[in-house]
Image (cartoon, rainbow, N blue to C red):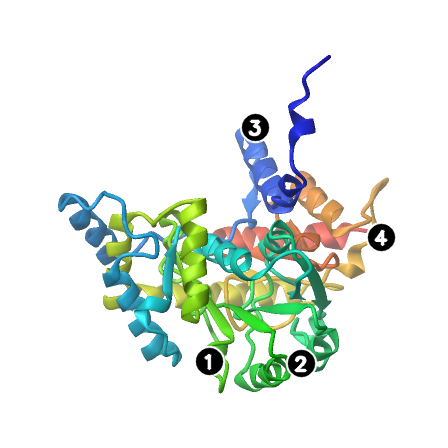
Amino acid sequence: MTFDPASLLSPRASTADEGAIIRMSQRTRELKAKGRDVVALTIGEPDFDTPLNIRDAAKTALDKGLTHYSPVAGMPELREAIAAKLKDENGLAYPASSIVVANGAKQAINNAILSVIGPGDEVIILAPYWLSYEASVRFAGGTPVILTAGVHEGYKVPASRIAAAVTERSKLLIINSPSNPTGALWTRAELEDVAAVVRNHPRLMVLSDEIYEYIIFEGEMTSFGALPDMLERTITLNGFSKGFAMTGWRLGFSAAAEPIAKAMARMQSVISAGANQFVQYAAVAALKGPRDEVVAMREAYRHRRDLVLAGLRRIKGLTIADIPGTFYAFPDVSAFIGRKAGNRAILSSDELCDWLLEEHGVATVPGSAFGAPNSIRLSFATSEKEIEKALTRLSEGLSSLL
């Protein structure tokens, strides 16, 4: 009898997949290795270096020998700095004991979902959504309930549709503002309407992912937990990767009512352990230090956003909403689905992205990965030169479809 390792995989293993982004990134690397000129707009990673004061703080911590295990929930100095930041910047009165520092915001999300969601629990996810939300819910044994908003709604599901989707099994609503992949920003009034829905359902909590809060171009940041009666009903998630250009440092955090925070710390102790010690001291420097470079990065993204919006809106048939935050564009490409490139039929956004990469040297991500199959995602966390090249290639490619 032949041994088949694949036959031993658990059903859970099939839910742990970020296929579209990984597939497009891998294909891009393969083409570049063959000498192809490819503009990569796939990965949501700042192209800036981490600010100098943060790097210096990490070096100082290393020189002091701060390379040992840290408490699972995080170093006291960092938890206190995060609590102060949340109070001063977000109006969130969490004590330091309610803060859990994680090995990246993604782990913080999984800590939260694994701590409150089990088999039979429903989680309302607003599409377009970051693809890891659905995977994490399924990983925990929960049932995703997907609600979709289109480009003409600014990609924001109205509170009335959220209310209609709540059942006695609903336990969590996930909100990401500013949003990956759309760049949408929920206004305070819109979030207050959602809060009114949450108040009517005593079992319903909100997971508020605020990782892009420092990359807002128009409008103001509203933390869901700062709304009346919402602090204990909200798990607030954030991290250092986007605003501080610290993706490779792998540091995120959550804030929640203490019973939930303690559960998330226990979950993290089983899955991994405390985050890197010297990186945590660098994070303290990020929170307490100057924000000049954070502001400069945001202004660079703003200029790139303007280039991207202007370029995409010149392409006939493509529809794009405003982008008040993040470094993503999420145009609706449904007008191009069903067209042909020579004898090749383009029947989905996945096929469109493949064709754009193979034939025009521009790498994007299909909207199917984000619960919106008629769109594609472009990251403009790259140079203006590359953005202009990509826009030219997109225009030429899409305009050639018959």
Element at label 2 = helix
Q: Residues within 10 Å of mark 3 (few under 14, many from 20)?
A: few
Q: Determine which residue is flagged by label 1.
A: 220
Q: CA distance from mark 1 to mark 2?
A: 20 Å
Q: CA distance from mark 3 to mark 1?
A: 45 Å
Q: Residues within 10 Å of mark 1 (few under 14, many from 20)?
A: some
Q: Nearer the viewer, mark 2 or mark 3?
A: 2
Give the percent coordinates (x, y) of residue 285: 23, 61
Q: Determine which residue is flagged by label 2.
A: 159
Earlier residue among tags 4 and 1: 1
Q: Nearer the viewer, residue 398 or 181?
A: 181
Determine whether label 4 and label 1 are within 8 Å by CB.
Answer: no
Task: Look at label 4 and name its amino acid.
Answer: Gly
User: Measuring 27% from the left and 62% from the top, which residue is drawn there?
Assistant: 78
Task: Look at label 1 and name its amino acid.
Answer: Glu
Q: Determine which residue is flagged by label 4.
A: 338
Determine whether label 3 and label 1 are within 8 Å by CB.
Answer: no
- Quadrant position of residue 117: bottom right
Q: Residues within 10 Å of mark 2 (few under 14, many from 20)?
A: some
Q: Is residue 7 left or right of residue 274?
A: right
Earlier residue among tags 1 and 2: 2
Q: Determine which residue is flagged by label 3.
A: 34
Q: CA distance from mark 2 to mark 4?
A: 33 Å
Earlier residue among tags 2 and 4: 2
Q: Is residue 110 left or right of residue 334?
A: left
Give the percent coordinates (x, y) of residue 115: 52, 58
